[in-house]
Amino acid sequence: MSLQAFRTGPGRRKALFLALGLVALALAGCRAEAPPAPVQSGAEVLAADDFASLSGQRVGLIANHTTRVDTSHLADRLAAAPSVELGAIFAPEHGFRGTAGAGEAVDDGRDPRTGAPVYSLYGDTRRPTPERLAGLDALVFDVQDVGARFYTYITTMGLSMQAAAAADLEFVVLDRPNPLGGGYTDGFVLEPDHASFVGRYPIPIAHGLTIGELARYIRAERLLPGVGRLDLSVVAMENWTRSLQWPDTGREWSPPSPNLPTWETALLYPGMCFFEGVRVSEGRGTERPFRQIGAPWSPEAAQQVVDTLRARDLPGVRVDTTAFTPRSMSGAPAPRFEGERVYGFEVQVTNRRVVEPVKVGIHALHAMYHRAQARGDTAFVSRPEHLARLAGTDRLHTQLRHGAPPEALIASWTDAVETFRNRRAAALLYDEEGAKR
């Protein structure tokens, strides 16, 4: 029918206008929304202000390979800044360049680019000593965290806060995103008897805080002796909101440690790290650490574990069988079951918005534990003390031994997590819409 025919009567004109309106709406719906502005880290905010808040100071920098401003290392930028003197660099686990394996001692040295001494915080001492702080005016902390309680960088931060307080130094945290977002909190809250370097604070496994907010919480709650008197400041991010997961930030993923090569690995890590405390391969020595779990079992036993997990219909993930052979590689020297074929399962993220990694880990550990019991593998929990350090409690192992279902394990931490969420409110720097407090 021609356009002229539509002009002959009001009914047809009305139909034409309706059709044109629907086309306009469809075209509007097809337009892509403008992407949000990329998140600026605290280091980038500080550098954009020419390090004004550090002017005239001699600073020590706690840093690793993630300590970057755009394409430059922050140490290089500080060393070149005319108003700031870089007096020392302090390196956490995995070293200043981030290449040392998990648990591997980090040595002292000297940075060839800046000439600054590099002092290890993961060797003979795990906190800055008074001798190495002598002559400094401030300690600056800028290391990318992953949002899990047992990631050692946050213990390093707390011990360094203690050292700064004792030495009457200002402690400056350059904030960075929590890769899991600022809303997800889950898992056992650490009990004081199980405090260690892989879990120092009474917080859930997934704490939902940025590194700057966690520093504020540590000081406000006086979680370590002496930190209540610390002169603490946080350089806040720009454009970060609590709902943002890492892919929403507009930032490239730089592995904060060798065995977290992708953001999806970091997302699963708070739950899959439980497997470090039992007799399996957690995927170290492969290209998919913490995403695949294997044991020297049969393919049939692995299929039974996968069938169990699939029947539980865990939100946001798909579980498949896998087989792999761990090999020594950079960042994973001498992995468990090196050179041995193991069978197990692989977890793939299908919907990052709904996955709850700690619960995934609990379900997976429960399924593996009961398959091991059925096989007569009484040594499956090979490191009960380490499992307790990771969980922050010995209740996990106890409840597994007593046959508790995953739902009971999960329910046992619900009240404590809610209490934590209420207590942390005063330490938050950003609200749900991202406005800074």
Image (spheres, rainbow, N blue to C red):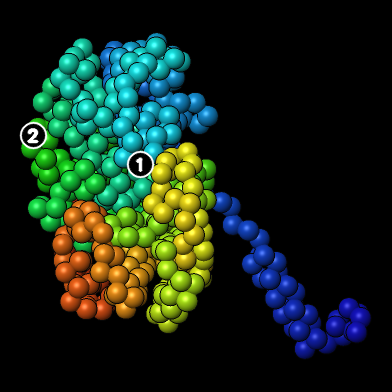
Q: Which mark is residue 113?
A: none
Q: Are marks 2 and 1 in contact (CB under 8 Å)?
A: no
2 or 1: tag closer to the N-terminus: 1
Residue 422 shown left or right of residue 344 in the figure: left
Q: Which mark is residue 102?
A: 1
Residue 162 or residue 402, whichever sits in front: 402
Residue at 85% across, 83% down: 6
Q: In what element is the residue under mark 1? A: loop
Where does the image place residue 121, in percent across and percent down from the top left? 26, 29
68 up-or-down from 356: above or below = above
How crowded pointer 2 is (Cα within 10 Å; few <14, some 14-19, many 20+) is rated as: some
Q: CA distance from mark 2 to mark 1?
A: 29 Å
Q: In what element is the residue under mark 2? A: loop
Residue at 52% across, 43% down: 252
Where does the image place residue 144, in percent across and percent down from the top left? 38, 40
Residue at 80% across, 86% down: 12
Residue where numbered disc 2 is placed = 226
Q: Amino acid at mark 1?
A: Ala
Q: Does any portion of residue 73 appear in the rendered image?
A: yes
